[in-house]
Image (cartoon, coloured by chain):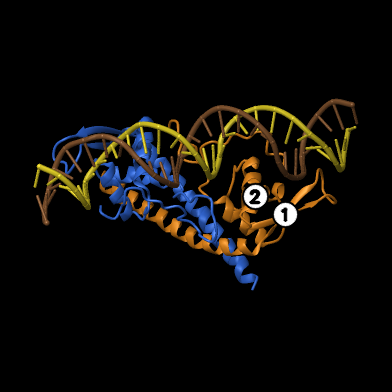
Chain colours: A orange, B blue, C yellow, D brown
DNA sequence: TCCATCTATTGACATAATGACTATAGTGTG
DNA sequence: CACACTATAGTCATTATGTCAATAGATGGA
């Protein structure tokens, strides 16, 4: 992953304009990680690459690692060290825990609701931006 | 608004399960407020009611007020006091500033992207949850 | 009148999440 | 051995939010 430099400063995925509050990717990281782990075990560095394919771009590596640590504390995922077959230092391999599967299912319901809310906002905007010209 | 009690504790709108990181409404509050103000000036307490109609439910009043303060600092909105015609103490009436209109437009683009990412996650989940049974 | 309730906004402190920079270290290549 | 890539984690500051509480005007009923 040569594209990532040591400290990537990716503030503001959101609207630019002037200065903004920091723009997080709005709690999409956790479900995305769980989905990746549905496919099989993986370590943080590899997960960060898989997230790009899910349109979760520009997530700082540091955030991926910290999120994984938090998710493990909650018991959603579990980890083991792999010291062989690496292309560098040891890897912490994460697997999906049963509780993680349940959390993921609930999260999907929540995401559907969020999407509907976003659609509502987009519609409300269109309504007034077209009515107001 | 008799439904809101003095200190509303609404932690975890997201997936429940066990203990969770706090579930914010993922940066939908700012655009929702801007959309409300497109329709005309309003004060915080009234905006909180309008947000319900946009499916932004269970947003603590305190958060609405703080978000408004922040948005005014950024110059997206402006406020004036209204001391007459209130049904209680003075109201701080917010109006949409020109910079706020621009921010809103950009935000809509960002929201469309977020919605597409969510749809991608939902699809990826379906793919594996159906293939895995 | 006094009290409860709704209306309306804000202060203050603690916690949580992230940004930003840095540290560490194994592996492979020229 | 220098260098780039792989791989994870520590630390401190900043930002965002949770949580409880304070303040205060208006309204209606006992």
Q: Circle 1 — which element? A: strand
Q: Nearer the viewer, residue B18 or B50?
A: B18
From where the camera sits, is residue B26 visible? Answer: yes
Asked if marks 2 and 1 touch (Cβ < 8 Å), the reply is: yes
Q: Are marks 2 and 1 on the same chain?
A: yes
Residue D24, placed above or below residue A34:
above
The image's mark for residue B79 is: none
Please give the chain letter of the residue carrying mark 2.
Answer: A
Q: Position of residue B7 (x, y in %)?
A: 35, 48
Q: Secondary structure at mark 2?
A: helix
Crowding at dot 2, Cα within 10 Å, few <14 / some 14-19 / many 20+, comes out as: many
**Compared with residue B74, is residue A33 higher up or lower down, i.e. above or below?**
below
Query: Cα distance, mark 2 to mark 1?
Result: 9 Å
Q: Position of residue C8 (x, y in %)?
A: 24, 41
Q: Quadrant of residue C10?
A: top left
Q: Which residue is mark 2?
A: A68
Chain where mark 1 sits: A
x%, y% of residue B92?
25, 36
Q: Tell whether A105 sits left or right of A120.
A: right
Dot placed on the residue nearer the N-terminal end, 2 or 1: 2
Q: Which residue is mark 1?
A: A79
* Residue at figure coordinates x 65%, y 42% from the top left: A61
């Amino acid at each position: 992953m040569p594209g990532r430099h040591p400290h990537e400063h990716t503030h503001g995925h959101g609207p630019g304009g002037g200065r903004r509050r920091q723009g997080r990717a709005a709690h999409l990281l956790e479900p995305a990680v769980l989905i990746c782990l549905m496919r099989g075990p993986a370590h943080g560095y590899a997960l960060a690459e898989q997230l790009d394919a899910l349109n979760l771009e520009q997530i700082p590596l540091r955030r991926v690692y910290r999120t994984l640590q938090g998710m493990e504390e909650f018991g959603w995922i579990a980890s083991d060290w792999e010291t062989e077959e690496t292309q560098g230092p040891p890897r912490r391999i994460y697997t999906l825990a049963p509780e993680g599967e349940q959390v993921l299912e609930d999260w999907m319901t929540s995401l559907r609701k969020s999407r509907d809310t976003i659609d509502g906002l987009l519609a409300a905007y269109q309504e007034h931006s077209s009515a107001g010209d």
